[in-house]
Amino acid sequence: MSETWIVARREFAAFVRTRVFVLTTLFGPLVMLGFLLLPRVFASPHGSGVIAVIDRSGRGLGESVARSIEDAAQGGDRGLRVRLVKGRPVATPDLVPDSADAVVTLPADVGGGAAVRYEARGAAGLDAVSAVRYGVDHALRDERLRAQGIDPAAVDRALAGTSLEIVRTGQRAEASEASLEPVLYFATFLLYLAVLLYGNAVLRGVREEKENRVVELVLSSVRAESLMAGKVFGIGAAGLLQMAIWVAVGLFVSQYGGGLLEALGGVAPKVPHVPVGSALVVLLFFGGGYFLYAALYAGLGAMATSGQEAQQLQFPAMVPLIVAYFMVFGVMSDPDRPLAVVGSLIPFTSLLVVPARAILGAIGLGELALSAAILAVSCWGALWVGGKVYRVAILATGQRPSFRQVWRWMLES
Amino acid sequence: MGTKSPDGSPASDESPAIEIRGLRKSYGETVAVRDLDLSVPRGSTFALLGPNGSGKTTTLRILLAIQEADRGELRVFGSTIDRRVLGRIGYLPEERGLYPRMTVIGVLTFLAELKGVPRRAARERVFAWLERVGLQERADDRVQGLSKGQQQKLQFIAAVIHDPELIVLDEPFSGLDPINQQALRAIVADLRGAGHTILFSTHIIEHAERLCDHVCILSAGRAVAQGSLAEVKRGHGGRHVALTLDPWSEPGVATVRGAPETGRVWADGAMLEVALADGASPQSLLRRLVAAGIGLSRFEVVEPSLQQVFIERAGSASLEEGTLV
């Protein structure tokens, strides 16, 4: 049996039995559920937030402003209530009800240049401000249209938008971009988290082996490269298992738990159709990218002589991953821009950029093959360099060897 | 003799268990092993003796392919080191440890599998060894729950679980209490009796003298004496005389030191060990001392002790290299 396989099996078994793995596997879906429900929980509760509208326009605009604000509030589900105070040209403080959180005052010359005044107790909530802005603008627009003899409803009908379905020719991706966006965010975040989590687990595992002093015994049977590769594969397989469980739970909830989520006030995620080819690209680049970072982390773990040192060494290695994460947001706005193309070729960023473009159906076969080839060569290089660093640094104790020292040892060996 | 191969067939030749030629390893400016030649006969119990920092551990790590040499040639059972050869070697490193959260059976089975023992056979062997060292009840316990002495037994089992022809033990007695030292000596004696080749490093002469039949003394990365125990002692300077002055006196010691038959003298209270000068006979020395009226309660022709050989060879070589023993 291959020595890499024996090591990988041990690493897999050891990792899935750790408390961290069990807890994150169980609670991961709960955290995801939280992401779906929390926005509602933190949103303003219904019925709270009363806005008083004082109409000094003298032309009955207050009523339509109040209605428009209410419409805007309901449309955005902001839970605002509007109370119209009318009939007095000049408002006095006693007119403002105690229950009002904010007061909107329409001046006499509203629409003619005078500003509408918005006074709020405490900080002005952005939701309320935007509802008020929309309400006032909308009411004034309707008033002006009517003055021109135009029916505002007819204008609304004339300006009604249509849904845009985007179909990329020559590819099977037929989902609209609107529904793909959440999938992209979710997939990118999940991949980023996975590389970070499991790469870190590799680093920790290497360091523990060094601290436990078991590594010399293992290295008397296994080549350093095989030990490192086995560790990376074993922990990676455990990570894949965990992600598969999360994705399965996610699919199950979206399929059967939508009603329950909506009853709880959340929004059931709609899972768009992602072609099998794109899913395979995601898996391939995630696997390759994870391997690249994990091999790097293994080398760093071998150099570290304490947990604190490991953390210090790990940070610089995280930077390209963070860059890749933010790159995806640029890619989403235009998947064919030069940034996206360059990001697809650099192996430290392609693990996130290529899956994003594949989900959008925005990467050609030739480019895909080139990215995959660069990533594969980089993985081989990382295994070679990581294995060398591992071999020369893993038995060094006491003071941590410097990068220059390790480089010299590598050249000497 | 330990000439069986993993598949049970006899080895094809009688090449030494280990043959090292011109081995060199340095860490930056520090030379750990310098142009070392070493030959370990099959079936021998071979002690690699040397003070701390003399290159013992580095030599063993290179032998086990844990580290790479800068240059030199290394053969085990006539072959260069590969995974097949490594499967014929058992190793107990000086820096010892096990996976603390694994079970006893789990960790030993894993280490046996790495040495090429199939899983099922590995488990059977583990149980047999656990029974032999009295730990059969702890098979399913986690390693971290065992005492230090019990863990040391597991580490030793890990070195021999695959029934290796060559067993390499780096400072095997360090950290062991006297009872475990005795138990380990007994197991080593058993293994030697069964024809295994045993190479162990130590800086404690007593262990080497008690266990080994061959020795190599290392100093500052260089072999300063090598061969069978008798050869090394003989090569150190012929015959020695152990004598005890009775009563002890300063002039008596001075007379011994000043005698023309006397080469070097090592004094330990009233007991002296004298290396005879070239061509001198012990009888001549005895006659001279009796004629001088010096009382003696012991006058015996002996081989030089390994301790003397070690101190002189390792010490002088270290001084030549500018390092302290």
Image (tube, coloured by chain):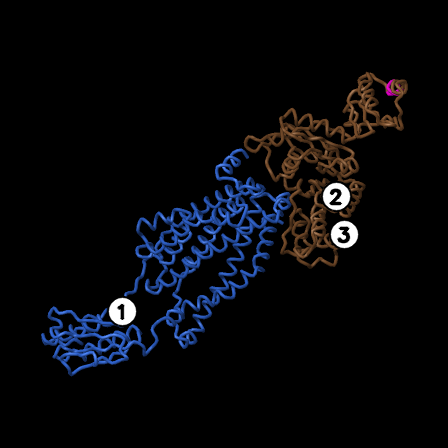
On screen, residue B125 above or below B209: below
Residue type marked 3: Val
Query: What label does residue A124 carry, if any?
Result: 1
What segment carries the magenta color? B282-286
Magenta-span inclusion, residue B283: yes
In screen coordinates, is A292 left or right of A179?
A: right
Q: Is residue B290 magenta?
A: no
Residue name at image x 60 percent, y 50 percent:
A7
Q: Position of residue A71 (x, y in %)?
A: 25, 76
User: Quick one: SS at disc 1?
Assistant: loop
Q: Is disc 2 placed on a helix, strand or loop?
A: loop
- Same chain letter for marks 3 and 2: yes
Q: Chain of mark 3?
A: B
- The one of A110 and B216 positioned closer to us in this rendering: A110
User: Residue B133's mark?
Assistant: 3
**Which chain did the image draw in blue?**
A
Same chain under badges 1 and 3? The reply is: no
Report in which chain the residue with disc 1 lies. A
- Closest to the observer: B249 or B64? B249
Q: Amino acid at mark 2?
A: Gly
Name the kind of residue labelled 1 in the image. Ala
Q: Earlier in the sequence, mark 3 or mark 2?
A: 2
What type of secondary structure mainly makes up the magenta span? helix
A221 relative position to B237: left or right:
left
Badge 3 vs badge 2, beta-carbon distance below 8 Å: no
Left or right: A323 as drawn, with respect to B321: left
